[in-house]
Amino acid sequence: MNMLSNIKHTAAEEVLLNQLSESRNNSASGALEMLSERGLPTRKVEPWHYTDLRTLLRGYPHPPSAIQSEFSGESLKEMPDLAQGFTIGFSNTSHLIGAVKDLPEGVTGEVGLAAANTTHEVEIAADTVGLLNSALAENGAVLNVAPGAKVDGAITLAHTCAGGTASVLRHLVTMGEESEALFIERHHSSTIENHENVVCNLKLEKGAKATWVISQELGQATTRLGQFNFDMAEGAELTILVLNAGGKLVRQEIHGRVRGENANLAIKGVNLIGEGAHIDVTTTLSHEVPHTTAEELFRNVVTGHGKGVFQGQIRVAQPAQKTDAQMACNSLLLSDDSDFSAKPELEIFADDVVCAHGATVTDIDEDHLFYMRSRGISERDSRALLIKAFVDEVFEETEPEALGESLIEIIETWLDANA
């Protein structure tokens, strides 16, 4: 199947299109046609203005593969839990850990190609991350939390990739009315060039409560294109925690629809961006009904020649009166060569709302540094303590307490190595 016509494609696009044309996934032909017509997004595509994927993605490794390696298999077994509970583990595209028959009480599910082929109504049509995932996903999990179930412990979706291959997975989670659960999405990779694309879809029915954690500690050569989509019904509550602490090129998208009155949302994240890394967090939130709340907070630390991006959009439809939505992005640049671009947006069509956004980019406050040094603390230790306080605050009140402590420990390990 040749869809390339006369359009000039980059080497990465040629490899992708050839993979798509050979894919077993029924969605591949439509995705191939779209990607062939458009190519990978450039800065001219507004949502990708700060992450020129066509330029940054200079190559693409082998097709999604079940190739195993000592790293990927062993790292799944040795990966410390962020919170106690049940783990479903994937190495590249293979499901290695966690038989679904052993899921916690109140949770049912399946793992396999059928899961990868599922769709979800909150997915963003014709987006690059979703298109690639729809066409190339070979595995994933479909989980259902029963109405009224209070799941004991966390459900972790653990991912490792190694061997210089591409790992593409898709997960779908549905929470029944008045149910409660904690989900942790973890990502590790080896130090060589790997590509990961994971899309997770979460649907919360009336009164459901969930915490969803996205934590990635990828190798310095890994590319990650991730997407989390959610849909909230009446009275639903959702907390999303994001920790990016690795990777060469990372694009984490969060897209959500608040479609039920009295729904409450909180998104909190920390981006730790080291030498040569490019990390982009892009969020879109749509309030469609009255009496909903949302709070969005990201803290970012950038070192060396690292580059960070935050794009956050809140849309308030005309019927969504009494919406309360707040968004803040605060960045700390630790070198003259580091860079962070922030683009918070409000699109409001209702006239009785409380909405605000803000962004700051700064270096360590010299007055704070002087205060600590005047008390006998070395400059290095003073800087470390100030940076730690800046980012730890995001996760300090996380429940369960052990989860917050685990996230803070990851931050401290990264700071010791990079800052």
Image: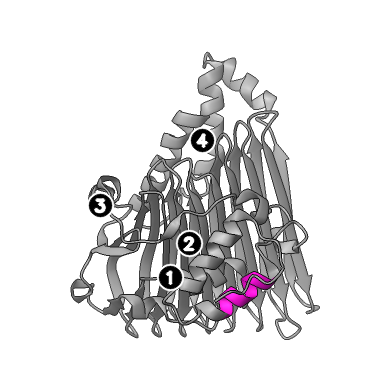
Asked if the residue under mark 2 is in contact with the one under mark 3, i.e. CB atoms within 8 Å, the reply is no
The residue tagged 4 is 388
Residue underneath mark 1: 137
Whichever of callouts 4 and 3 sits on the residue coming sooner in the sequence is: 3
Query: Which amino acid type corresponds to the residue marked 4 in the rendered image?
Result: Lys
Tag 2 residue:
197
C-alpha distance separating marks 4 and 1: 37 Å
- Label 4–label 1 contact, CB within 8 A: no
**Residue drawn 38% across the image and 49% down it:** 188
Q: Is disc 1 in contact with disc 2, using a CB cutoff of under 8 Å?
A: yes
- Residue drawn at x 57%, y 80% as measured from the top left: 30
The three-letter code of the residue at mark 1 reads Ala
Whole-number angstrom distance, CA of label 3 to CA of label 1 = 20 Å
**Neighbour tally class for label 2: few under 14, some 14-19, many 20 plus, Cα within 10 Å:** many
Mark 2 is on which residue type? Asn
Q: Is residue 122 magenta?
A: no
